[in-house]
Amino acid sequence: MNGTDEPCPKCSSPLGEVTETQTGKKLQRCSQGSWNKELRKSEGCEYVKWLMIEPVELDEKCPKCDSVLIMQVTRFGKKMKKCSKGGWDKELKKATGCDYVEWLTGKKEPLDTDCPTCGEKLVLFTTNSGKKMEKCSTAGWDAANRLATGCAYIRWLKPGEVPVSSAGEEFLPPEPAS
Ligand SMILES: [Zn+2]
Ligand SMILES: [Zn+2]
Ligand SMILES: [Zn+2]
């Protein structure tokens, strides 16, 4: 996606390059401004333009109405699949059309560690916000009954901690705090 050529509305300088955050959000900062990582604050012009991420059409059908599903990313970096027939009425503040939505909640990687509770393998689960936890591979979510299923073992990893069984191999060093 390309940025726009509009000047900064605060200081009329051109906007800088489009950059992407760790969570996949895109933004354009004023060329007169920069982010000081040590002081955690903006320097110079503080104007930031958040770019909307275009919904992507998926090769999947809505289970409710059979229309095409689209992938959308919210301003907060959460991903969801939603029905292309669904919409949002800003005046009435309610959903219109098909209301099918499926939130995507991070990714799973298999681990070579046995669950201390039931002896099955564990998986490493990374949430969209980058938090990691070990959970049992038998754990699941029954969406219809809104109930957790399978084994309930969960252990959150501290920031930067790597699962013991794979330390030094498949895992990169922890990302620096930003
Ligand atoms: Zn500016
Ligand atoms: Zn639908
Ligand atoms: Zn288990």
Image (cartoon, rainbow, N blue to C red):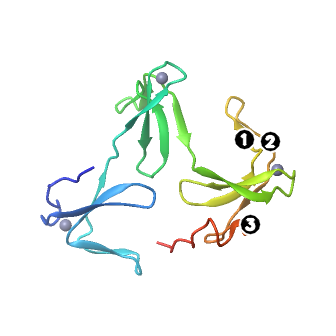
Q: Residues within 10 Å of mark 2 (few under 14, many from 20)?
A: some
Q: Secondary structure at mark 1?
A: strand
- 5 shown above or below 30: above
Would residue 178 be found to the left or right of residue 157 on screen? Answer: left
Mark 2 close to ligand 3, CB under 8 Å: yes
What residue would you read off at disc 2? 150
Query: As drawn, which residue projects farthest toward the top?
Result: 65
Q: Residues within 10 Å of mark 1 (few under 14, many from 20)?
A: some
Q: Earlier in the sequence, mark 1 or mark 2?
A: 1
Labels in figure, total: 3
Q: Residues within 10 Å of mark 3 (few under 14, many from 20)?
A: few
Mark on residue 165?
A: 3
Q: Earlier in the sequence, mark 1 or mark 3?
A: 1
What residue would you read off at disc 1? 140
Mark 1 close to ligand 3, CB under 8 Å: no
Q: Position of residue 110 (x, y in %)?
A: 69, 53
Q: Residue at x 72, y 41 (%)?
A: 140
Q: In front here: 88 or 162?
A: 162
Q: Position of residue 26 (x, y in %)?
A: 34, 55
Q: In front here: 141 or 40?
A: 141
Q: Quadrant of residue 45?
A: bottom left
